[in-house]
Image (cartoon, rainbow, N blue to C red):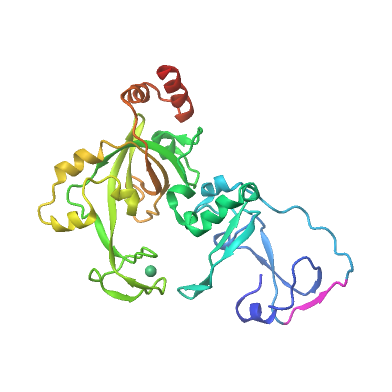
Amino acid sequence: MIYGGDIHFFKRHFQPFRRYYISSAKLETVQPRYSTYSNEYCWVIDNSTVVQQVHESEPPMLPDIFNFKPYGRIYEHIDTDEEIDLLGVAIHVNPRAMRGPTPTREIIIVDERSSKNQEAFLKFIAERTYADRLNLIPAPVDDRVVTIKSLTTTNTKRPYWIRGIPNLLDRSQKMWYNACPICYKYLRARPNLEFDCTSCHKCIRVSPRCRLTVQLIDHTGSITLDLNGNDAEQLLPFTIVEIQKQEIQLDYTTIEDFIKQNNLVCLVKKTQNTYNSAAAAKYIAIIAHIRNSTPEELVVISKYTTNYATTSASWNNKLS
Ligand SMILES: [Zn+2]
C-alpha cells in the first residue's frame, strides 16, 4: 500500500512486470472494511522505504492472474466486488472528459466477432449502436431468468434477470423528474433551463425524465421495482409531455390498466436500503424489455413454478 503524497513520490519508480528489492516496509493488519483482497496483512511503503529495482534481462513470467469474461456476461458483475478482465481491440477512443474531479474517457472495445463482420462494425460505430442500451443488454434467450422468489431469497449481490407483470404501485406518484438529458442527474431546476451540467459538464437543457415505481409480479412472488427513462416510458399510454399537461387530474385508471397489460423481462439489482432493513427490499431495473406473452404462454406460466428454461421449453411443446 502507498498512501497520499507517497503515491506521487513513487509514480515513476514502479513499472509493471519488473521486480524490486524492498527493505524495511511496514507490516500492517488489513482493515476488512478497506480490503479488496483476502490477505490478512499488507506492506505499507513510504518515501523512506528503500526500494531498488532488480535488473533482469528476462523478467520471470507472471502467473496467470486474469479473470477473462465474455462480453455477453459482463452485466453479471455490475455492482459486485469482483474484478474482471476483458480482452479486446480498441476501435474508437473518445476525448477525455471530466466527471466531478475524475478524468474519464469512453473507449469502444470489440471482441473477436468484429473481425468476421467489419462492415457491420463500422456501421455500429457510425450509428452509435454501442450506446443503445436495448442492444447492449438484449433479453436473455436461455435459462438466465430466475423467479422472483429465488431473487428475493438469494444473498448473492449481483443483478438478475426476472420476468413478470407490472402493476402501478402508488396512484399519487409523479412519474417524471427534471434531469440532465446526458448523464440523467436529478436537478432541482425549471425545465428547459440551459446551463453547464454540474455533473457531466456538458452544455445541456434540463429535461423531464420518466420514473415509475411498480410492483412486479410473477407466479412465485412480487417485488417493488423502480424503472427510469425509456424503460418506464414504454409502459405508459401517454408521453411525458401529455402527463405534464394533465398533471392535476392525471388519468391514473387508464395508466394502471395500460401498465399491467405488459409483460416485462428485466435485469434488476437491489437498491441500497440501509436505513430500514426491516422494510421490503426495493429493486431498480438496469434494463427492461417488454415481452408480451400469448394467452397460451400465460396459462403455462401460471402452471409452472420452475425457471424460465423449463417454462419456455413447455411453451414450445404446448404451441407445436
Ligand atoms: Zn449531466
List x then y, in percent, for residue 88.
64, 55
Q: Position of residue 223 (x, y in %)?
A: 33, 41
Which percent across, then down, holds residue 167? Answer: 25, 40
Query: Along the line of sight, which residue is nearer the eye, 217 or 1?
Result: 217
In the image, taking residue 187 as reference, residue 23 lies left or right, namely right
Taking the image in four quarters, ligand 1 sits in the one at bottom left
Q: Is residue 314 magenta?
A: no
Q: Which residue is at the front of the view, 276 or 149?
A: 149
Q: State which quadrant residue 253 falls in.
A: top left
Residue occupying image coordinates x 40% and y 54%: 272
Instruction: Name the side, left or right, on which 218 lies relative to 160.
Output: left
Q: Residue placed farthest to the right in the image?
A: 57
In the depicted view, which residue is nearer to us: 26 or 4?
4
Task: State which region is magenta.
Answer: 48-55
Q: Residue at x 52, y 46 (%)?
A: 76
Q: Quadrant of the C terminus?
A: top left
Q: Is residue 205 above or below residue 76?
A: below
Q: Outermost residue, left direction? A: 249
Residue at the (34%, 22%) spot, across then down: 296
> Which x, y percent locates residue 157?
49, 47
Q: Quadrant of residue 222?
A: top left
Which image quarter is the N terminus in? bottom right
Residue at screen point 48% across, 38% down:
140
Residue nearest the observer in this picture, 238 or 314: 238
Residue 276 in sight in this render: no
